[in-house]
Image (spheres, rainbow, N blue to C red):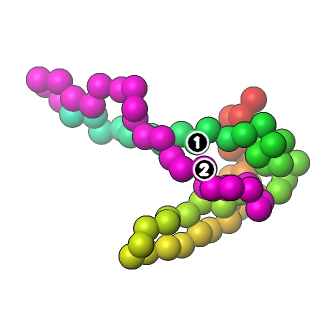
Amino acid sequence: MRVDDSEKVFAISNEDLTQDNNEKTASVHFMRFELTKNMHAQAKVGLPIYFGIDHPLFKTEVVVPPEIQKSLVQDLD
């Protein structure tokens, strides 16, 4: 992901969770992104947030719709 024209930030996934035990395997997974202070500030003032896939066989990027960006930014505080 990136904010406006910032450097890409890659997802960190489930690094601190136990994924399974003798009775179950986790069905909920999440990703988090470590944004810089500048990216945080840019997102809060409404500069676009992009999410994408950067794989040699498939590359794509989409802009986060404004109503979703508003909700994501609220989670940054």
- What secondary structure is marked by label 1? loop
Q: Is residue 35 left or right of residue 24?
A: right
In this view, the residue farthest toward the bottom is: 57
Question: Who's the residue at 74% across and 56% down the image?
Answer: 6
Q: Which amino acid type is marked by label 1?
A: Phe
* Quadrant position of the N terminus in the picture: bottom right
Left of 43 or right of it: where is 35? Answer: left
Q: Position of residue 38 (x, y in %)?
A: 81, 43
Residue 41: which disc?
Answer: none
User: Height in image: 2 above or below 21?
Assistant: below
Q: Residue at x 68, y 65 (%)?
A: 63
Residue at image location 77% in from the left, 41% down from the top: 40
Above or below, 27 against 5 in this view is: above
Provide the residue span drawn in magenta.
Answer: 1-24
In-front residue for pair 14/56: 56
The dot on residue 33 is 1
Residue pointed to by mark 2: 9
Mark 2 in CB contact with mark 1 (< 8 angstroms):
yes
Residue 23 percent coordinates (x, y): 13, 25
Mark 2 to mark 1: distance in Å?
Answer: 7 Å
Q: Nearer the viewer, residue 26 or 57?
A: 57
Predominant SS along the magenta part = loop
Q: In the current view of this chain or complex, which residue is farthest to the left? A: 22
Q: Residues within 10 Å of mark 1 (few under 14, many from 20)?
A: few
- Kindly identify the residue that appears in the image at 36 percent across and 26 percent down: 17
Q: Is residue 76 magenta?
A: no
The x, y position of residue 74, in whole percent, is 74, 37
Q: Nearer the viewer, mark 2 or mark 1?
A: 2
